[in-house]
Amino acid sequence: MAVLNLKSCEITELEYKKNIRQSGQIALETSVAYNLRFADREKTCIGECRIVVRDKDHEDKILLRINHVGKFIHDVGELTPELKRKFHIETAKALYPFWNTALSNLITVTGLPPMVLRPPEIDEEDVVLFQLPKKD
């Protein structure tokens, strides 16, 4: 059984814009994108989540963007595609409480009602693997 440990996590980017001039309702939409990169030689993987909250109809009214990164180490010599897919799912689940807490706290500071992200529901067949070109 492969061992995967979270070593660190941090918010690497935070952007907030609010341009609401009069009272009224806004309809917020949230998007979450997650990817996982592997550094095979160092037995590490980096999970990056990008969360965007904005007004559905007028992006210039309100925008909150959070980029959250988690670094994991593992004990596997050769990562198979199947194991990479499993790590993708496991790392997303491990980082979810951090994403959710960051979003909840930042939303509250902006004066908007509390917001909670749904936990990630990722199936192995939905994880797409691709190889980035090696740097010279």
Image (tube, grey):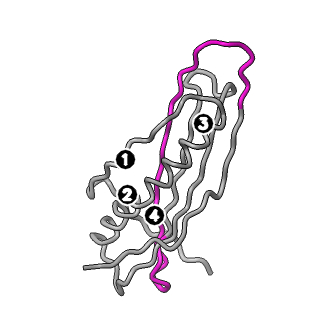
Callout 3 secondary element: helix
Disc 3 designates what residue?
108
Mark 4 or mark 1: which is in front? Answer: 1
Give the percent coordinates (x, y) of residue 14: 67, 49
Number of the front mark, 4 or 2? 2
Give the alpha-carbon distance from disc 4 to disc 1, as whole Å.
Answer: 17 Å
Residue toward you, 21 or 123: 21
The amino acid type, in three-letter code, at marker 1 is Pro
Q: Pick whichever of labels 2 and 3 is earlier in the sequence.
A: 2
Q: Secondary structure at mark 2?
A: helix
Q: Over which residues does the magenta segment extend? A: 18-45
Q: Earlier in the sequence, mark 2 or mark 1?
A: 2
> What separation in Å lies between label 4 and label 2 (alpha carbons)?
12 Å
Q: Which is more N-terminal, label 4 or label 3?
A: 4
Q: Secondary structure at mark 4?
A: strand
- Which sits earlier in the primary sequence, circle 3 or circle 1? 3
The spot of residue 13 in percent (x, y) is 66, 53
Amino acid of disc 2 = Lys
| Circle number at residue 119 | 1
User: Label 3: few (<14), some or many (≥20) within 10 Å?
Assistant: few
Residues at marks 2 and 1, CA–CA distance in whole angstroms: 7 Å
* Above/below status of 7 relative to 106: below
Q: Which residue is mark 4?
A: 36
Q: What amino acid is labelled 4 in the image? A: Leu
Q: Which numbered disc, 4 or 1, marks the residue that appears first in the sequence?
A: 4
Q: Quadrant of residue 20?
A: top right
- As displayed, is residue 136 above or below residue 61? below
Q: Position of residue 2 (x, y in %)?
A: 30, 79
Left or right, 19 with respect to 76, comes to right
Residue, disc 2: 93
